[in-house]
Amino acid sequence: MDLVMLAKALAIGIGSIGPALAIGKIGAKAMESIGRNPESAGKILVPMLLAAAFAEAIAIYALVIAFSIK
């Protein structure tokens, strides 16, 4: 039972590192782009949110895998 809990913790822990880094980089680059060209904020917002949603989906897949470990 303890090894199952450890496996679940590792699955969600390791599976969320990549998406967390990706979302941080997406936000940083979007803010950098808006800082350089403030008029482009409207054009940057939608692709930034879409990319963040795709990165977040990876973390949700890791959560599903963690819940499916028996």
Image: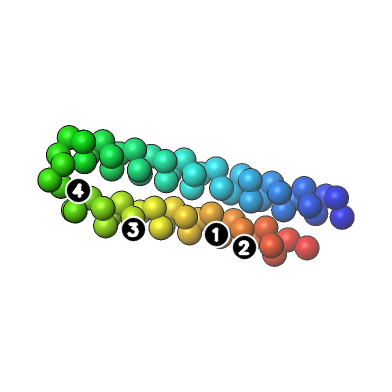
Q: Eyeballing the image, is 54 above or below 27? A: below
* Marks 3 and 4 in Cβ contact (< 8 Å): no
Residue sitting at x 69%, y 62%: 67
Residue sitting at x 56%, y 48%: 16
- Give the Cα separation between the discs numbered 2 and 1: 6 Å
- Residue identifier under label 4: 41
Toward the left, the furthest residue is: 39
Residue 22: give x, y in percent of width and height: 43, 44
At label 3, which amino acid type do we have? Leu
Element type at marker 2? helix
At label 2, which amino acid type do we have? Val
Residue sitting at x 42%, y 41%: 24
Indicate which disc residue 50 carries: 3
- Residue identifier under label 1: 60
- Give the Cα separation between the discs numbered 3 and 4: 14 Å
Of callouts 1 and 4, the N-terminal one: 4
- Give the Cα separation between the discs numbered 2 and 4: 34 Å
Element type at marker 3? helix
Placement of the N terminus among the 4 image quadrants: bottom right
Of callouts 3 and 4, the N-terminal one: 4
